[in-house]
Amino acid sequence: MATRKIVQIEAALCNGCGLCVGSCAEGAIQLIDGKARLVKDDYCDGLGACLADCPQGAITIIERDAPAFDEAAVATHLQTLGRPAPSPAHAHHAGCPGSQMRAFAPKAPAATTATAPAASALAQWPVQLHLVAPTAPYFRDADLLLAADCAAFAHGDFHRQFLTGHALAIACPKLDDPQGYVEKLATMIVEAGLRSITIVMMQVPCCRGLERLVTLAQQSAGVEIPLYRVIVGIEGEILLDERPA
């Protein structure tokens, strides 16, 4: 037994929705008495594919003494559950790196030149609103940038002008299924304690749906925090900027 990364589930936060059960390819999480539980340490690879599917932010990755991840034991366990073995994409500590929650160390600003492009201002992963855990550490006491998917492609200076110093969530009110978005944003406001929200949206009418989501979330939370709107033209120009100077 050695110290390693492993999931921890906060029973008080878990509402028993079961989304994490399906997202755990190893079957390490099951619903027991209406709560998600880690059934055996050596079934958990510690990569945290389940984090992004927990709408309550009840799952975190910690480091503690635990048996090593056991692929053979997982295979036997999945047979007893009648579930297929993880696909090759999950091999070597199966999990989904694309949805694993990560916080990045701050990057030193760099001057943009022909040979030295500007550094990324992104401070966390994932960023898609559907995937983020609303009580993730990087949302606590943060200024949230809620951006339309297209905004970073339309405005060439997106990172420097908008993203620096902000936690990020992106969404498309036209193409996404927004079910749960209002509740997730309300949780960020109340439980994560967001300081402010800046919405960066495109000038197209459907992008106003982002503002509607935030308005409904504040009503649901019963809390109003500073809200700033930025509208980007389809050619990248800034048409409206309500942020304080």
Image: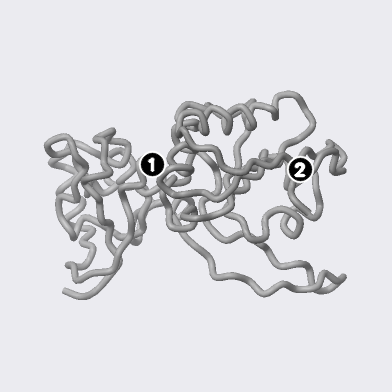
Q: Is residue 59 left or right of residue 195?
A: left
**Callout 2 crowding tier (Cα within 10 Å): few <14, some 14–19, many ≥20:** few
Q: Is residue 156 left or right of residue 130?
A: right
Q: Which mark is residue 19?
A: none
Q: How many marks?
A: 2
Residue at image location 30% in from the left, 46% down from the top: 25
Q: Position of residue 83 (x, y in %)?
A: 23, 38
Q: Secondary structure at mark 2?
A: loop
Q: Mark 2 is on which residue type?
A: Glu
| Residue, disc 2 | 242
Residue at image location 75% in from the left, 60% down from the top: 160
Q: Position of residue 243 (x, y in %)?
A: 74, 47
| Residue, disc 1 | 53
State which tag comes first along the sequence, 1 or 2. Answer: 1
Q: Mark 1 is on which residue type?
A: Asp
Q: Secondary structure at mark 1?
A: helix
**Callout 1 crowding tier (Cα within 10 Å): few <14, some 14–19, many ≥20:** many
Q: Is residue 137 above or below residue 117?
A: above
Q: CA distance from mark 1 to mark 2?
A: 33 Å
Along the line of sight, the residue nearer the viewer: 169 or 142: 142
Residue at image location 51% in from the left, 51% down from the top: 126
Q: Position of residue 138 (x, y in %)?
A: 49, 57
